[in-house]
Amino acid sequence: MSWTSIDQDLCTQCGICVTRCLMNYKEVEGVITSSASMATCNLCGHCVALCPTEAITHHKMDMENFGDLDKRVDYDFDGFKSFVRGRRSHRIFEDKAVPREHLGKLVDICRYAPTGSNRQTVEITILQDRDKIQRLSDHTVDFFENRLDELEKEAREYEAAGKDLPQTTRSALTMVETLKRVVMARKFGMEVIFHRAPVVMLFHSPTETSTPKDDCVIASTTVSLAARTLSLETTYIGLFEFVANRYRPIVQELDLPPGHKVFSILVLGYPKLKFLRNVDRKPMKARWL
Ligand SMILES: Cc1cc2nc3c(=O)[nH]c(=O)nc-3n(C[C@H](O)[C@H](O)[C@H](O)COP(=O)(O)O)c2cc1C
């Protein structure tokens, strides 16, 4: 049976569905028919959302969750730019829990972030247990402490052998100074991995999809912007991504679903500091071809 069907009483044969999706809709002798299957349909839902007369039903999607577009939203460029410019990485948070309801909203909004081939495989792990977050932070710094010596030794060995360093080692080496600072900071009693945030969000996905990292980063970026509408602020935590999938104590502690890797991390909470002005950034380089 086709994944989609057309109510011929409602269909005006306008052909919009055919224009949008030749894979699943065709017009034969003035009548439009559909035949969608796993091989031809990636559940984008565009056919249902475009049909002017609500004639299309998608049997693999929740038809209740289509709904009318919210026409109240006025997408003003300057307003949106201010909102984007006003986002800052926050690293000092109020000692205040984030209501579950708000976290639920931030999780739910990720449903609507795009994914490669519409695979929708991104999952989110939300950490709020202070002890667990601290343990993960400690493991991360332990890893860096051990890795620093190894990295420098590895670099010397490759250099002595006149060989090119592998890409992973090269990118790790660019971080040596940062890693040294992180190790030193712990000695001073600072928590520079998760910044003592009340919430850590891990965005993970099976690795076998075509764009797992992009999908996770788009979801986390959606959260980092949406959070601001709830008076919450965030910071991406690339330092943890570096270790999350490779250091056994962390892999064990996270116990991700089989085949998953962490591709993006945010800390989140109510910011203690209030920025009073925007910050400068380098002009974008663009090529107009
Ligand atoms: C992919 C990525 C990884 C990052 N990793 C960390 C991190 O591990 N720790 C941290 O404190 N900040 C991290 N940041 C925050 C950046 O340092 C910050 O975005 C940058 O300094 C610009 O500041 P702004 O976000 O306030 O504009 C990361 C940012 C990005 C985009």
Image (cartoon, rainbow, N blue to C red):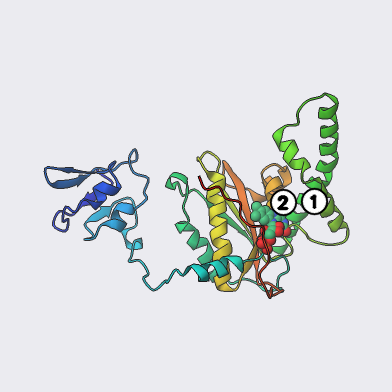
- Three-letter amino acid code at the position of disc 2: Leu
Which corner quadrant of the figure contains ligand 1?
Answer: bottom right
Is residue 100 in sight in this rendering?
no
The residue wearing badge 2 is: 239
The quadrant where residue 92 appears: bottom right
Callout 2 environment at 10 Å: few (<14), some (14 to 19), or many (20+)?
many
Q: Where is residue 164 in the image (x, y as percent from the top left)?
A: 75, 28
Vertical placement of residue 274 versus 140, above or below: below
**Residue sitting nearer the eye, 152 or 119:** 152
Secondary structure beneath label 2: helix
The residue wearing badge 1 is: 178
Q: Nearer the viewer, mark 1 or mark 2?
A: 1
Is the shortest distance between ligand 1 and the CB of mark 2 under 8 Å? Answer: yes
Q: Residue visible at 88% across and 61% down?
A: 188
Secondary structure beneath label 1: helix
Q: Where is residue 74 in the image (x, y as percent from the top left)?
A: 42, 71
